[in-house]
Image (cartoon, helix red, strand yellow):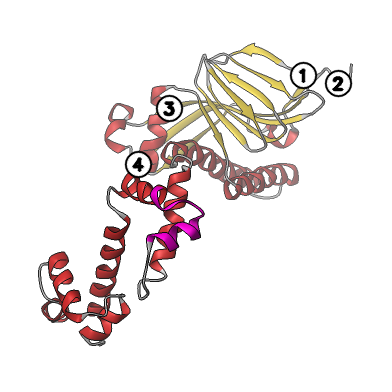
Amino acid sequence: MKNNRQIWHTPSAFASLDDRSVKLSLGAALLEIGHLQMHVHRVNSPTPPHSHPQYQLLYYPGGNGEQTVGELREKVQPHSLFLIPPGTAHAFSPRKGTETQAFSLRFDAVAEEAENHDARVEDGGGQVIRLLCDRRPRAVRLQAKAAREAARLLAAIRDESLGREFGHELAVQGNLLLLLQVFFRAAAGAEKEPPPPTRAGTVFLIAKTWIDQRLDEDIAVGDAARYCHVSESYLQKIFREVIGRAFSAYVREQRLERAAYLLRTTELSVKEIAVECGIPDQNYFARQFRRSHGTSPSAFRTRHNS
């Protein structure tokens, strides 16, 4: 049946890359990639569980379904990327009635100085070394910029291979290395992505922006709560949970930080700065500033402008 088939093939544009050996330099890492194979397949029926002796990067430019990699089970959406360690069983089930495009790249890799990978995790190459050394499956969805770059590089590889103009092999290899960089950076960077914002975190950011724009005005927690569409007590609770301080303490800190900035960067008088920061009582302003910065506003200005 037409709707129950798998089509696997190596396009002629990628045929010349089969079993090609290349070296990828990424930060402090040098990856020696051999037995490189690139396949593009269109799948609209399930693939049975199977494994390969090489690493595999499996990228879905389009389509939907579910991918299993060992114990990992993830939804497949356009621009989903999977890093599959050697010998790890994996399978794909497309969403019923849809057709999925997949780009498969298998390779062997040896990371230079892999035994030292823990000391280099902050480096881009160190991240790749760690990805390959711990042999844990990864599932990533490329962000828009990375997805556009991957599409551009795949098209460039195809066009250079089909055109076969002078230097096309060098161009194909260069674009391939850039494509691998896109994939590895996406896989490494996903570990550093912040967790989704909580409701409390979102409300805090809204309130913070509202406060920072009104430091020269009277600021009341009730007004901020109404702006954020929450109760006063809930907003107070959020500030204590997110930054460990009360709403009023945060407002005071921001006023005095702005005062310090103005003292360093402007020639406004101390009285004018006090007004600009919402503390028009100059004596009270001086006491609060000394408590915060350990010196008077005038002495602070002299020390930082000398």
* Image location of residue 128, percent across then percent down: 42, 35
Q: Residues within 10 Å of mark 3 (few under 14, many from 20)?
A: many
Residue 306, quarter of picture: bottom left
Label 1 or label 4, whichever lies nearer to me, is 1
Residue denoted by label 2: 3
Are dots 2 and 4 in contact, CB under 8 Å? no
Which quadrant, please, contains the N terminus?
Answer: top right
Please report whichever mark, 3 or 2, sits nearer to the chain's N-terminal start.
2
Q: Are marks 1 and 2 in contact (CB under 8 Å)?
A: yes
Image: 282 above or below 92: below
Q: Label 4 neighbourhood size at 10 Å, few (<14), some (14-19), many (20+)? A: some
Q: Which residue is mark 4?
A: 28
Residue appearing at x 31%, y 31% in the figure? 117
Q: CA distance from mark 1 to mark 2?
A: 7 Å
Pointer 1 or 3: first along the chain: 1
Q: CA distance from mark 2 to mark 4?
A: 47 Å
Q: Position of residue 149 (x, y in %)?
A: 61, 48
Mark number, residue 132: 3
Q: Identify the secondary structure beneath mark 2.
A: loop
Disc 1: which residue: 45
Question: Which comes sooner in the sequence, label 1 or label 2?
Answer: 2
The overriding secondary structure of the stretch rendered in magenta is: helix
Is the residue 155 above or below the residue 260 in the image?
Answer: above
The secondary element bearing badge 4 is classed as loop
Amino acid found under the numbered disc labelled 1: Ser
